Amino acid sequence: MKPLGITASTLTTGLGAGRAITLAGLQAGRTGLAPARFMDVALPTWTGEVPEADTAVLPAALRDFDCRNNRLAWLGLQQDAFIDAVQRARQRWGAHRVGVFLGTSTSGLLQTELAYHHRAADGSLPPGYLYATTQNAHSLAAFTAQALGVEGPSSVVSTACSSSAKVFGNAARMIHAGLIDAAVVGGVDSMCLTTLHGFNSLELLSPQICRPWDAARNGLSLGEAAAFALLERDSDAPQGWLLGVGESNDGHHMSTPHPEGAGAIAAMQLALADASLAATEIDYINLHGTATPSNDSAEDRAVGHVFGSNTACSSTKGATGHTLGAAGGVEAVIALLALQHGFMPGGLNVQTIDPALHVNYLQHNRSAPLRHVLSNSFGFGGSNASLVFGAAR
Amino acid sequence: MSSLTVWVDGVGVLGPGLPSWSSSLATLRGEQPHAFVASVLPPPARLPPAERRRAGAAVKLAMAVADEAVAHAGADPHTLATVFSASSGEGGNCHILCETLATDTPMVSPTRFTNSVHNAAAGYWHIAVASRAASTSLGAFDASFGAGLIEAATSVALSGAPILLVASDTPYPEPLHAARPLPDNFGIALVLSATRSERSLASLSIELVPGASVPTACADASLEALRVAIPAACGLPLLQALARGEEQLQTLALTYLPTLTLKVSLQRVNLHAVA
């Protein structure tokens, strides 16, 4: 594909709000994970929570959108002068030529969960409950578009953990097809009971902090996050470049990855081909790395197949947790930070690397100039996406 | 305004009083009035028995219209990339999960959780047809049909490869139904390709027009009531134009976002072949 400039980006996770605190946290080897504090959930599990998602206040004009997910989106948008960058794009291209493509898995579902806790005697939901602007998946994109004053095509991609990586593809295609000139991409997902209890019922949550690539890894830690990036057809001083997008399906099972990582292999190979790069030209891979026994095994096989055992790689989910529909966006922005700062974050919480896994997994931070970074996001239901980013010259 | 052109090779439809594309042609052409008869969702033949039994309305609807469009197009589902657009996930699952979570000791069914994801229909389809082709599952609330159509058309135009578009919506049970009152299920599937073939029914040239233009309405009041009530039914004017054997170019305005209208210029070809 023709490279697209990333003019601006931002992320807010359990590590904190904004790029600077995220970078500092990764460089210090800090984690944003702690034993779950969310509501009165009694599950033994660690989470990457953003407490300000509870207390952020939406502007009056956007009050109908009030729910944890949109409050987290609002908090995320306030960082890193992202809104200013979008305003400049809007002025440059026109409001109808800026699209919004965001990923989420549960959007404002918490609002509905809370409403079900307060049903009337006849079973009806409380009168203040607003479905369209809270629970519905698209409320995230509608909220973001209104908050930013952009009026172009918009949709929410909801393919579980690959959602906010895939939206980079949706936006790139739409820019290349000439329908728009710029797009706000990324994703937001937030704490809710459905995912906590749902992943628990599948026995995919670790009772401790998650340990990607560890011999004793036993599950994931959920996190919440907001991540945004601004893609433009033409960018004067980009933070980095989107060079390639690869997407595939496992076509295998609804909640277990293909054991040989066949779909994952396809996504990575398609991304490299789209970027016109050989595997050896990738300097660092940000793994999906959820710390479930099956994901890490399948991903290790897949990455080994495509890249061999030399390419430096790590999962950053030991720092942020698995942010589900926001994970692709979070890790895209981390990939950009890596390129801009010549910094590869070591994977956290490893005691002993699993001897059955063979990729070059970094346990400690490493500094080196980076030209190209690949980021993997492999989702529930077998939806896979890999993105290739390039350094700004 | 730039436009995209794709070819329609196959159609599937399922909604109240519209049990399939082939059996709905007379209604869509206006040769007989439309009557709201509650839709009936078939168990998905492609799924193995256990999954077939457990499939909820959203999966059943999506797979039914996908099957019809693929058969109509004579396409190989194993290789087809897909776009699934729905304004929500499976409503029944969401309700039961929320009820469960409101109890003191929630016991969530792992299968129900798995089936509650927005991309469940896509997941089951790709497993059933053993396809590793790319797929997107998206939603844009009331704009979901338009969002799916432009995503699919964009992909076809850039890749040159055909795509199966499935736009489908299912209602919520109470108490959520009161907050989002869809009257019934409705689904449209289209197989879109980049080049004309003997299978092609029509070419579509798609443009985005700023503002909310007056949309093309259905002359039949009962169809028009569906068009404004269920997001996937925003495609009804497109179906009607496809059903008609009109030689001249038909220009349609389809409801999309409050800020943008989808203008579709449709040219029917192969006028005798329609089902």
Image (spheres, coloured by chain):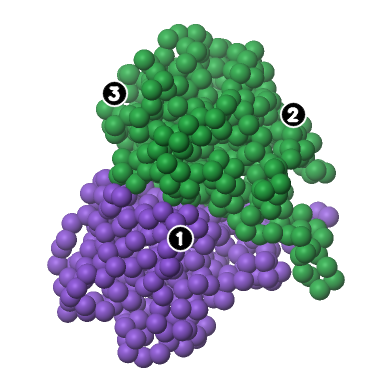
Chain colours: A green, B purple
Residue type at tag 1: Ala
Residue A294 visible from this viewpoint: no
Q: Nearer the viewer, mark 1 or mark 2?
A: 1
- At 22% across and 69% down in the image, what residue appears? B249
Is label 1 in a helix, a strand or a loop? loop
Q: Are marks 1 and 3 on the same chain?
A: no
Task: Measure the alpha-carbon separation of dots 1 and 3.
Answer: 46 Å
Q: Quadrant of residue A360?
A: top left
Earlier-in-chain disc, 3 versus 2: 2
Residue matched to label 3? A278
Viewer-proximal residue among A79 and B42: A79
Residue matched to label 1? B212
What quarter of the picture does the N terminus of chain A occupy?
top left
Chain label for disc 1:
B
Q: Quadrant of residue A390?
A: top left
Q: Pointer 2: residues within 10 angstroms few (<14), some, or many (20+)?
A: some
Chain label for disc 3:
A
- At 28% across and 52% down in the image, what residue appears? B3
Q: Is residue B46 above or below residue A224?
A: below
Is label 2 in a helix, a strand or a loop? strand
Task: Measure the alpha-carbon separation of dots 1 and 2.
Answer: 48 Å
Percent x, y for residue A199? 64, 45
Q: Pointer 3: residues within 10 angstroms few (<14), some, or many (20+)?
A: few
Task: Measure the alpha-carbon separation of dots 3 and 2.
Answer: 39 Å
Is label 3 in a helix, a strand or a loop? loop
Residue type at tag 2: Ala
Q: Is residue B38 left or right of residue A43?
A: left
Q: Is residue B189 above or below residue B83?
A: below
Q: Nearer the viewer, mark 1 or mark 3?
A: 1
